[in-house]
Amino acid sequence: MKVRGERECKDCGTHWSYYDTGSVVCPQCGSIRSVGLDDRTEHTATTTQLDLSTVRGLVDEVTLPELAGEVESVSADYVRTVGFILGGDLLVLDDVYLAASELRHVAADVSRAMRVSDAEERYFFDLLAGADEGDRTAPAEVPDSLRSARGLAAAQAVDTYGTEVRRHLEGNPDRTVSGLLGTLDEHRKRVAALDGDVSPRTAERLVRVAQDLGRAVAEDDETSLARAQERLDDLSVEV
C-alpha cells in the first residue's frame, strides 16, 4: 500500500515516522488525529518481530506434537505479516524470514507425524532455538525426511519476495532484474510442483538468487546482479 510516512499530530504537534512505529497514533499523546506531511509512498514492511520466547517456554509443559503446533502457528503469523518495501525502498530477503518460513513447515511436519525420529526432533529444536536470530542450518545437515519442508519454505519465501520485488519495480523498472526474476520464478514453480522435494542445496540456491536480486536492486550492486545470473545458470530443478 502507499502511505504518507512523515506524520504530524494535530493535537500536540509531535512529528514522527509511520515507517518506524507502524501506526498513525501519536507516540507522544496517543491522539489518532494526525496528518501526513509527505507524498504517498509504497510501503509494505512492518515493525513485527519474530518472538519465539513464549513457545520455547512450553518445551517442558506440552507434548512434542502440541509444541510443534504452537510453533507452526507463531511462525505462520509472522511470515504472513512481513513485507519488504520500507518507505519506497526495497529490503533484502533476510535470514529471519527464511528461518521462520522453514520453521513453519518443519513444525507442521513434526506436529502431524505418527513418529518423529531423533534427527527430525533435533533439527526442529535447532531451528526453534535460533530462528528469531536468523540462524539457519546448513543444507548438508537437513534430514532427508525434512527436505520437502526446506524446499517448500524456500519456494514460499521466493514467491512472497518476488511479488514484493515486482511491486517495487513498477515504479523503478529494470528489465534485467525483471528478466532474471521471471527465470527464478519458473524454477520456484518447479520446486512447488514437486511439493518441495528437491535437494536442500537446490532450495538454498533458490533463495540465494532471490537475495542477490534484492541486493542488486536495493544497493544498486552490479556484483550481486552478476552473481544472481551465475547461480541461475547453475540452477536445475527436475519435475
Image: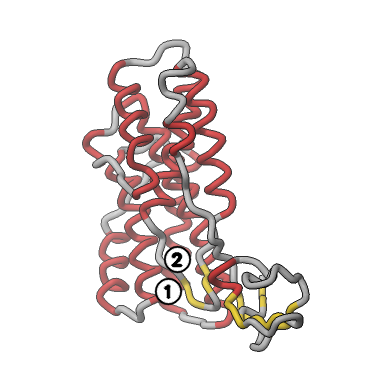
Q: Residue furthest bottom?
A: 38
Q: Residue furthest top?
A: 114
Q: Position of residue 193 (x, y in %)?
A: 50, 40
Q: CA distance from mark 2 to mark 1?
A: 6 Å
Q: Name the quadrant of the C terminus.
A: top left
Q: Position of residue 116 (x, y in %)?
A: 38, 15
- Count of marks overlaid on the render: 2
Q: Is residue 195 visible?
A: no
Which amino acid does the dot numbered 1 rest on?
Answer: Val
Residue 103's tag is none
Q: Is residue 213 visible?
A: yes
Q: Check if mark 2's residue and mark 1's residue have beta carbons within 8 Å.
A: yes
Q: Which class describes the residues within 10 Å of circle 2: few (<14), some (14-19), or many (20+)?
A: many
Which amino acid does the dot numbered 2 rest on?
Answer: Leu
Q: Position of residue 165 (x, y in %)?
A: 50, 68
Q: Name the quadrant of the N terminus.
A: bottom right
Q: Which class describes the residues within 10 Å of circle 1: few (<14), some (14-19), or many (20+)?
A: many
Q: Secondary structure at mark 2?
A: helix
Which residue is labeled 1 in the image?
Answer: 177
Q: Is residue 34 above or below residue 146?
A: below
Question: Which residue is found at the position 67% from the left and 83% from the top?
Answer: 8
Residue 25 horizontal side relative to residue 123, left or right: right
Which residue is labeled 2 in the image?
Answer: 181
Question: Foreground residue, 199 or 163?
Answer: 163
Q: Residue furthest left?
A: 140
Q: Is residue 115 above or below residue 188?
A: above
Residue 14 horizontal side relative to residue 209, left or right: right
Question: Which residue is found at the position 56% from the left and 62% from the top?
Answer: 46
Question: Foreground residue, 138 or 135?
Answer: 135
